[in-house]
Amino acid sequence: MICFSFLLLILLNSNQGCAVDKFIAATYEHAVILPENSSIPVTAEKALELMNRNIDILEKAITSAARQGAHIIVTPEDGIYGWIFTRETIYPYLEDIPDPEVNWVPCSDPERFGRAPVQTRLSCIAKNNSIYVVANIGDKKPCNVSTVGCPEDGHYHYNTAVVFDSDGKLVARYHKYNLFLGEIQFNVPPEPEMVTFETPFGKFGIFICFDILFYKPAAALVVDHQVDSILFPTAWMNVLPHLTAIEFHSAWAMGMGVNLLSSNTHNTSMRMTGSGIFSPETLGPYYYNMDTEDGNLTFSTLSAHPRNSSTFFTPNWSLYANSISKFSPGSNVFRGHLFSDEFTFTELTEPQGNYTLCQNNLCCHLTYTVTVKITDEVYVLGVFDGLHETEGQYYLQICTLLKCLSTDIKSCGEPVETASTKFKSFSLSGNFSTSFVFPEVLLSKVHLATGMFQVLPDGRLTSHANISQEPLLSATLYGRWYDKDPAAQDAGSKILLDPTVYFIIIALCVVY
Ligand SMILES: *[C@@H]1O[C@H](CO)[C@@H](O)[C@H](O)[C@H]1NC(C)=O
Ligand SMILES: *[C@@H]1O[C@H](CO)[C@@H](O)[C@H](O)[C@H]1NC(C)=O
Ligand SMILES: *[C@@H]1O[C@H](CO)[C@@H](O)[C@H](O)[C@H]1NC(C)=O
Ligand SMILES: *[C@@H]1O[C@H](CO)[C@@H](O)[C@H](O)[C@H]1NC(C)=O
Ligand SMILES: *[C@@H]1O[C@H](CO)[C@@H](O)[C@H](O)[C@H]1NC(C)=O
Ligand SMILES: *[C@@H]1O[C@H](CO)[C@@H](O)[C@H](O)[C@H]1NC(C)=O
Ligand SMILES: *[C@@H]1O[C@H](CO)[C@@H](O)[C@H](O)[C@H]1NC(C)=O
Ligand SMILES: *[C@@H]1O[C@H](CO)[C@@H](O)[C@H](O)[C@H]1NC(C)=O
Ligand SMILES: *[C@@H]1O[C@H](CO)[C@@H](O)[C@H](O)[C@H]1NC(C)=O
Ligand SMILES: *[C@@H]1O[C@H](CO)[C@@H](O)[C@H](O)[C@H]1NC(C)=O
C-alpha cells in the first residue's frame, strides 16, 4: 500500500518498479433516476440537474468504495441520464469529450474544452477520493453536414465510457461500437476502438454492454492486446436461460481468462440487475436482486495478472469430445426454440445416462446422474450450431443441459427461474469449431454455482459433488464462432430498435 500511494503521489505516469499483484475493485449497480419524459427536449440546465441527481448517488458509492480501499470503481451504462432518447432529446446531456492524449484533469482546468460540468465533477470525485472512476456519458463531435456520414443535425453522438485516474486525469475514452437495438440517439464510430491503459495493477481494456457478444472490440482486447482486466459498464436486460447478466458475464471472464468488472443498471421492470467482479477462477462476488429497487456496491480483491496464476490454463474445448465415440441420441429427439434459435433437444428420460446429440457440425456429449428424479420436471440436452438473428447477428455453437418451463416439451428453451431437481453429477462437452467457449452453470432462483463445477483441460464442464446441494436450472457451454459472423458489420446495416421493443421481443418469447 505504501508502494501504491507512493506511486500515485510521486511517479504519476509510471508503472515501473512499483507494480502490485493484487488490487481492490468495486462495481456499483445503480437504480438510475430517469428523465420525466425522454421524448420531450429539455434545456441543458434541466439535463444537468437530472445528471447531478444521479451523480450525487454515484458519488456516495464511489466515496464509500474508496474509504473501503478500492482502487477502481465501475458505474453502469446509462447510469447518469437513463435510456430511450431521440437524437434531439439526448443532445442537452452530451459534452465534448476530448481524446485522452490531451492530458487533461478537468477538475483543475474545467473550461479547457468548453462546457464540461459532468466530466469536471467525475474528475473531482476521482481526484478527491484517489480512486479510478469509470463512468458512461455521451460525447458530441461537430461535423460538416455536407460531408458523407455527418448526421443532418451536424454532430456525431457517441455512447461513451470514460475513465478518470486517481488524480482526476482523463485516461480513457471509448465510443461504443455495437449499439443495441433502439440506441437511435447515438452513432456508430467508423472503426471499433481498442482502448487500453496501464495501471500499477495491470493492463485494462474497456467496452460497453452489447459489445461483449462480438469479436471487436471485446475478444480482440484480450487476444490482440493481452489485457488483464476489462471494465464493463452495461444496461443489461436479462434473458434466460443463457444470457442473464451474472451468468454470461462470469462465463465470459472464465472463457477469456480475464477479470471482468461488470456494473449494471438496476430496474426490475426492465429486468436489469446483475453486477459483479468476475475472474477466470471465481464467479463473483455478484449482486442480483429482482425483489427491490436498490442499488448495491460490490467489492473484491483481484489478481492484477490473472493469467499468471499457477492454476490458470486455457482448455482445449474439443479435446475430450474428439476422443470419445458417440453415445445414443436418446429416444425422444425434437426441435424447439430458445431465444428464437432452433435447437435440437433430447429428453433425459432416466435418472442417469449418456447422450450424444448433434446439429450441423457440432456434437454435444452429456453424462449425468440425478439424485431424485422429480416427475413433474423435464430436463433436456440441447445443441445449436447456427447464426442467431434476433437482436443482432452472431454465430453460436451451444451445448446445454436445461430444465424446461413445464412438462410440455414444447416449453423447452423458454425462460425458467426455479427448479427442484438436483443433479448428483454431470459432464458436458462438445466438438466445438471455435476456441471461444463460455461455461455457465445456473442454479434455481438464478444463482451462480460458485465452486460447484470446473472446466477440465480437455474441455469438459464437470460438476463437483456439492452440485447436489441445490436444484439445477442449466449447465451450458456457450460457444461463439466469430469467424462465421456476417462479415459486413457496417454501421448502416446494423439493426436498430428501441430497447422497449427489445423488451417486448423478449416478452414475446416468454409469452407466446
Ligand atoms: C412523453 O411525451 C410524449 C410527447 O409529448 C407523449 O406523446 C408521451 O405520451 C409522453 N409519455 C409519458 C409517459 O408521459
Ligand atoms: C473532497 O473530499 C473532502 C473530504 O472527503 C470533502 O470535504 C470535500 O468537500 C471534497 N471536495 C470535493 C470538491 O468534492
Ligand atoms: C463544409 O463542406 C463544404 C464542402 O466541402 C465546404 O464548402 C464548407 O465550407 C464546409 N463548411 C464548414 C463550416 O467547414
Ligand atoms: C424502469 O424503467 C422503465 C422504462 O424506462 C420506467 O418506466 C420505470 O419508471 C423504471 N423504474 C424505476 C423504478 O425507475
Ligand atoms: C448488497 O448486496 C449484498 C448481496 O446481495 C447484500 O448482502 C448487501 O446487504 C447489499 N448491501 C446493501 C447496502 O444493500
Ligand atoms: C505477469 O504477466 C505479465 C503480463 O500479463 C508479465 O509481464 C509479467 O512478467 C508476469 N509476472 C509474473 C510475476 O509472472
Ligand atoms: C485441441 O485438440 C485437438 C485434438 O482433438 C487438436 O487437433 C487441436 O490442435 C487442439 N487445439 C489446440 C488449440 O491446442
Ligand atoms: C455412461 O458412460 C460411462 C463411460 O463412458 C459408463 O461408465 C457408464 O456406465 C455409462 N452410463 C450409462 C447409464 O450408460
Ligand atoms: C463433430 O463430430 C461429428 C460427428 O462425429 C462430425 O460429423 C463433425 O464433423 C465434428 N465436427 C468437428 C468440427 O470436428
Ligand atoms: C464444493 O466442492 C469443491 C470441490 O470439492 C470445493 O472446492 C468447493 O469449495 C465446494 N463449494 C461449495 C460452495 O461448497
Image (spheres, helix red, strand yellow):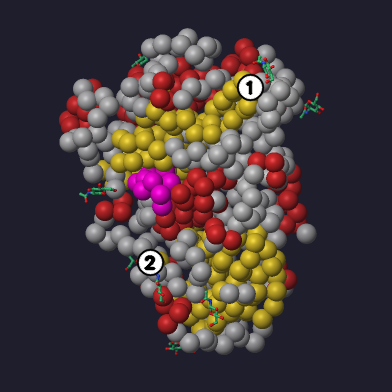
- Residue type (three-letter) at the residue carrying disc 1: Cys
Locate residue 124, reporting x and y percent. 40, 18
**Residue that carries the numbered disc 1 in the rendered image:** 143
Is 225 contained in the magenta span? yes
Q: Nearer the viewer, mark 2 or mark 1?
A: 1
Q: What amino acid is found at the position of numbered circle 2 in the picture?
A: Pro
Give the left or right position of residue 512, taking residue 245 as reference: right
Q: Residues within 10 Å of mark 2 (few under 14, many from 20)?
A: some
Q: Is residue 455 above or below residue 329?
A: above
Q: Quadrant of residue 413?
A: bottom right
- Where's the C terminus, which quadrant? bottom right
Whether the magenta-drawn stretch holds residue 282 is answered as no
Q: Decide which of 450, 188 is in the foreground and name it.
A: 188
Label 2 or label 1, whichever comes before in sequence order: 1
Q: Name the residue under label 2.
A: 315
Residue range (magenta): 221-231
In the image, residue 14 sits, relative to residue 56, either above or below, namely below
Which residue is at 38% across, 12% downward? 108
Q: Nearer the viewer, residue 402 or 292?
A: 402
Compared across the picture, whether 85 is left or right of 229 comes to right
For image coordinates 54% across by 20% down, the residue present is 96
